[in-house]
Structure formats: C-alpha cells, structure tokens
Image: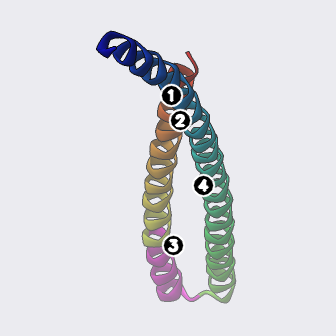
Amino acid sequence: MKRILGLGLFFLLCGAFPVIAEESADVSTVSLKEELDADKAKIQEQKAEIKTNAQAAHSEEKALREQIREARKAGDKAKVKELQGQLKTMHKDNVQEKKQDKKELQSAKKELRKDKRAARSARR
C-alpha cells in the first residue's frame, strides 16, 4: 500500500514540475522581450537627445562666430578677443559634453547586447 501511494505521489509530482517550468519559461521570455524593447527605446531617446544637444551647441557657436565677424567689421579688437575666448571655452565644453553623451550611449548599447545574449541563452 505504501509503495502504491509512493509511486502515485512520485508520478503526480514529476508530472507537475515540467508544467510549472514551462510556464515560468514563458514569463521569463516575455519579461526579457519587454526589457529588450525598453533598452531599445532608451537608446533611441538618448540618440534623439544627443542630436538635439548637438544642434543647439552648433547654433550657439554659429551665433557667436557671427558676433565675432560683426565685431571685426566694426573694428573692435577687444570685443573680438573676448568673443573668441568665449567661443573657445564654449566649444571645449560642447566637445566634452559630446564625449560624455557618447560614453552613455555606448554603455546603453552594451547593456542591450548583454540582454540580447541573455535572451538567446534563455531560449535554448
């Protein structure tokens, strides 16, 4: 009697585990897909932000260059020197910001690649 009960319990438990494992695999696949989609969206947002920042920086530098031209036409050498100094520091700051944005974008892409690898290994 104990053997029959033991065998019945064994088959009941062994039959239930694959179903539970299969359900959890579906849930993890969905969550990985959502995570990949979120990472892709994050990268797209960062690219758009970088592009906007670059355009703004370019237009600011362009306006400053125009002011330098006007000061040269007017013959105001002191103003030209001052504006050139401002342009130099502004350009240096813009380049530094661009480098920082690039690093952040690379780290987000690296995270996406890591998540893709995890999704591939989870499918296998």
Sequence-first disc among 3 and 4: 4
Q: CA distance from mark 1 to mark 2?
A: 5 Å
At a point 61% along the width and 34% down the height, the residue shown is 26
On the rendered image, what quadrant is the N terminus found in?
Answer: top left
Q: On residue 21, which mark appears?
A: 1
Count residues near mark 1 (Cα–Cα under 10 Å), then give few for <14, some for 14-19, many for 20+: few
* SS majority, magenta: helix
SS class, disc 3: helix
Q: CA distance from mark 4 to mark 2?
A: 27 Å
Q: Is residue 93 above or below residue 28?
A: below
The residue tagged 2 is: 24
Asked if the magenta segment contains residue 84, the reply would be yes
The residue tagged 4 is: 42
Sequence-first disc among 1 and 3: 1
Across and down, in percent, residue 31 comes to 58, 44
Q: Are marks 4 and 2 in contact (CB under 8 Å)?
A: no
Q: CA distance from mark 3 to mark 4?
A: 32 Å
Camera-near label (3 vs 4) is 4
Sequence-first disc among 1 and 4: 1
